[in-house]
Amino acid sequence: MRNQPEYNILLVEDDANHVALINRVFKDESHCHLMVTETLEQAKYLIGLSRPDLIIADVKLSDGQGVELLNSGSGPPTIVMADDSDESVAARAIKSGAAEFIVKSRETMASLPRMVSRVMREWHLAIEQKLAHERQQRLTAILEATPDLICIANLDGFVTYINHAGRNLLGIGKNENINRVRLADFHSVADGQKILSEGIPCAIHEGTWTEEITFVSLNGEKILTSLVLISHRNIHGETEFFSTIARDIRHLRAAEERVEYLAYYDTLTGLPNRNELTKRLEMEVARVKRTRLFGALLFIDLDNFKNINDSLGHPAGDLVLQEMAQRLQTHLRVDDTVARLGGDEFIVILSGLSLDGREATSLARDIANKIRSAISMECSIRDTELYVTASIGIAMISQDHVSGQDLQRYADTAMYQAKREGRNRVEFFSESMGCDVTRQLELENQLHRALKEDQFRLYYQPQVNAEMEVIGAEALIRWEHPELGIVPPAEFLDVLESSGQIVAVGNWVIETALKQMMQWIDNGLVHKDFMICINISPRQFRDPQFTQNIESLLGRINVPSENIIMEITEHNIIHNINHAILRMEELIGRGISFSLDDFGTGYSSLTHLKSLPVDNIKIDRSFVEDICTNSGDQAVVASILTLSRHLDLDVVAEGIENLEQFHFLRKYGCNIYQGYYFSKPLSPENMSVYMDAKKPAGDIPLLN
Ligand code: C2E
Ligand code: MG
Ligand code: MG
């Protein structure tokens, strides 16, 4: 006999005859175990206790109606029995969830075992269906919630299911019918073709096919996806339908492109970076060999960019770099490359200049000069006018077997030469430059040692008034070189400045001058209005620690700050006048005054003068030199003196070498004088002697 499932059946019946009959009917059904109870109440108790698989209940019981056990269908299946064929009872029973209803008779009761088997079969089926339905609902919920497009299509390509993400991606409305939709309609012709000729055969053959495919949504958006096409077979191995899973990889691709971009481009300026430059330079070297057309490599370095960063902060520095990158780009042809090496260094590759070396060189020079002027055009960053200049070194790219790396080195060397020659200029690389750079490095080392080994000296040049009384002195640095003797500042100041060593050396100068002044005061050699003038270099002036250093020196050395003049030139302020003024005002607040040195040599002196908090200007020696003979110089000096009177400024004339010059300037109303005529710069000892022996007022030689 077939293995039958076992059932526990609860029979609820108060008619003993019927119970006996039903018991008999089930006697041979060993898989059915009957439990019998007479009352509704007991039945309820037993249901809770033994959880029968099926209930057979009489409608009419002593304590109620069997229908009450039906419990709205959530309990086990129930067969309801009634004594007569009351239709309303039957209807009520079925409506309340009875699995079957019989009118009690010998026959119907005899058929109960068969009925039980059928009811149980149907019951199990219904439960299975319910579970399957629930399972499907869960799976659908998952499909609907996944962010990837998931789509099922029949063999003709028509969509039978598409999830929420898929509808979203393709722009298909939530309630739109998908019966006539084919996924193929959402691909470009090329991608559609690819799926047909490659994708479907491969999926049929291998089960899946994976490719990057672009969808075009209903609103025209192109969506790059990573797509998997899967073929599904029936039990006979025949393909029955396809499913597609597609993931939007636009963000991924954008991120990959960004990573790629970052590897080869500078984020700040968007220009190619060092990596990309190296690649392009090698290409250019190869091209020159092939085409014989000369090219050029320009090494561009902004002058004093560090000062902009130091004084205005890095965000402003970044803006300057972006602005300069922009200017470089607009001045080049599409074939040329402009790259940023880092910091304030840019490289330009000029391509295909000329077959003729001379012409190529001249073109490169013209372009470099154009770039130089573009850079030095006014630049306004956050309401501050900046004057940026650039030094440019050029190495020509010829057919010689020179590597890109060497070319960069050459152009770099030439750029350094441009800096040494005074910045804001263009220099071509020449073989001899290599030696110059080495010499510069050597000098830097020697200067480093000079400070450490105390080889610097401070000399003092007296300043006198119209009565030729000594009223002050300018401190001037000298280098007492162990072999070369006294070296003048012109030979080493630039190197100190460009290497940054000027900050330390400048501090030494200030400290030494103040100590010297203190000594003179202590020795009674100077009167209370004596001014000590100290030159401050641009880099030193912009050093973030500058004010702090001065304050700490003033704390240590007791010289009254009212006796100190700081000499600055236009170079100190040109990069950022507002910052310079702020810095000056800080120090003026401490009692120090300022003098504008080398006045007349800069290009916008008179404009700056009005806004600068200086007490004093020093007319440059070049105007004094020919003052007696050159009417142009006379005119300049006269107007400087008039302007100064208006602005209530003292004027110092520098470089007075003879009596004529002195008389001439005195006549024009100059009030302070300095020059070899009175004295050359003197060692501290000689200066002390000089002041000690100073002439009394009024002792001015007369002109013959
Ligand atoms: P400066 O500040 O304009 O100084 C005046 C220069 O003219 C000094 O040259 C001085 O010796 C020279 N001089 C003065 N009177 C005459 C004259 O009658 N005839 C001629 N031919 N020259 C005269 P020096 O000492 O060689 O200094 C050159 C420049 O170096 C200075 O020009 C100044 O800009 C700079 N310098 C000197 N000492 C220092 C220093 O301690 N720190 C800084 N940052 N710069 C300094
Ligand atoms: Mg000076
Ligand atoms: Mg001067």
Image: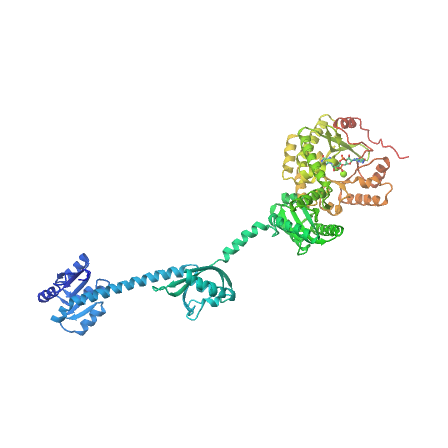
The N terminus, quarter of image = bottom left
Quadrant of res 126? bottom left
Which of the two residues, 653 or 84, is positioned nearer the viewer here? 84
Which of the two residues, 613 or 105, is positioned nearer the viewer here? 105
- Taking the image in four quarters, ligand 2 sits in the one at top right
Tell me residue 578's x, y (percent): 67, 46
Q: Is residue 269 left or right of residue 234?
A: right
Colour setting: rainbow
Report if residue 65 is visible in the image.
Answer: no
At 77% from the left and 29% from the top, the residue drawn is 682
Tell me residue 416's x, y (percent): 70, 42
Q: Is residue 200 left or right of residue 350?
A: left
Q: How many marks?
A: 0
Quadrant of res 228? bottom left
Which of the two residues, 703 or 100, is positioned nearer the viewer here? 100
Report if residue 455 is visible in the image.
Answer: yes
The C terminus, quarter of image = top right
Tell me residue 488's x, y (percent): 75, 33
Which of the two residues, 583 or 109, is positioned nearer the viewer here? 109
